[in-house]
Amino acid sequence: MDTIIVRSTEAITLLGGGRARAEDLSAALRRAPCLVAADGGAESALKAGHVPRAVIGDMDSLSDAARRRLPPETLYRIDEQDSTDFDKSLRSVDAPMVLGIGFLGRRVDHQLANLNVLARHHDKPCVLIARRDVIFAAPRRVAMELEPGSRVSLFPMAPVRGRSRGLHWPIDGLDMTPGGRVGTSNRVATGNAGPVELEFDAPGMLVILPRAALDAAITALTPAT
């Protein structure tokens, strides 16, 4: 059983060791003020003037200099080589929402591994933020307030069939798979007046939206209170 290291009633910003723009970190912290770092993400946090509430990972990317600047009680080492630091961190936090920075870009293999983790932990509301995109694993049903013409890309990480309302190209009845049909560069129908509604018969679908749709993605995934 996984151990929860950080429980928060507020949304969590999870900072990884990849490329993390200062403006994206600031935007995430405004929406998710509890900061947790995945291993080397603590380096970026310290450079930006933040001390994470916790640093989680195998610590192979954390320099000795950064380690000395961090309170020892904030370091949570998980010696496990068959999972990524994103995986270790995501499964070790409990919050209504997680915003992930520093998990997309740079190395393609790392990015693909992190998207795999995102899909496997589809039960945890989490949005990964990049310079041009925001990405999340779709729940079985999701409704999003998006601008007409806005890009809505769907990429299945497992066989998934779904239905849609408000997309230019409906997905009703389509069998979507990683090695077959995908939904790159769909968009909100020009005349759509309501939310875009998606429904899937199984987990495994990633939704990729423009960076400007960050708040729409957060609202769509935030659990009702």
Image (cartoon, helix red, strand yellow):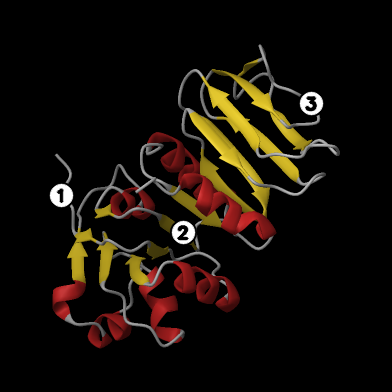
**Given the image, on which type of amino acid does mark 1 rest?**
Thr
- Which x, y percent locates residue 147? 75, 49
Nearer to me, 197 or 154: 197
Q: Are marks 1 and 2 in contact (CB under 8 Å)?
A: no
The residue lying at 69 percent from left, 21 percent from top is: 171
Q: Seen in the image, is 186 located left or right of residue 176?
A: right
- Which x, y percent locates residue 61? 36, 67
Mark 1 lies on residue = 3
- Which x, y percent locates residue 158? 51, 23
**Given the image, on which type of amino acid does mark 3 rest?**
Trp
- Seen in the picture, residue 81 relative to 8 is either above or below; the reply is above
Q: CA distance from mark 1 to mark 2?
A: 20 Å
Disc 1 packing (10 Å; few <14; some 14–19; many ≥20): few
Determine whether the residue tagged by mark 2 lies in a helix, strand or loop.
strand
**Given the image, on which type of amino acid does mark 2 rest?**
Gly
Determine whether the residue tagged by mark 1 lies in a helix, strand or loop.
loop
Mark 2 lies on residue = 100
The residue lying at 47 percent from left, 43 percent from top is: 113
Mark before the other along the chain sequence, 3 or 2: 2
Determine whether the residue tagged by mark 3 lies in a helix, strand or loop.
loop
Q: In this rendering, which labeled residue sits more in front, label 3 or label 2? A: 3
State the mark number for residue 169.
3
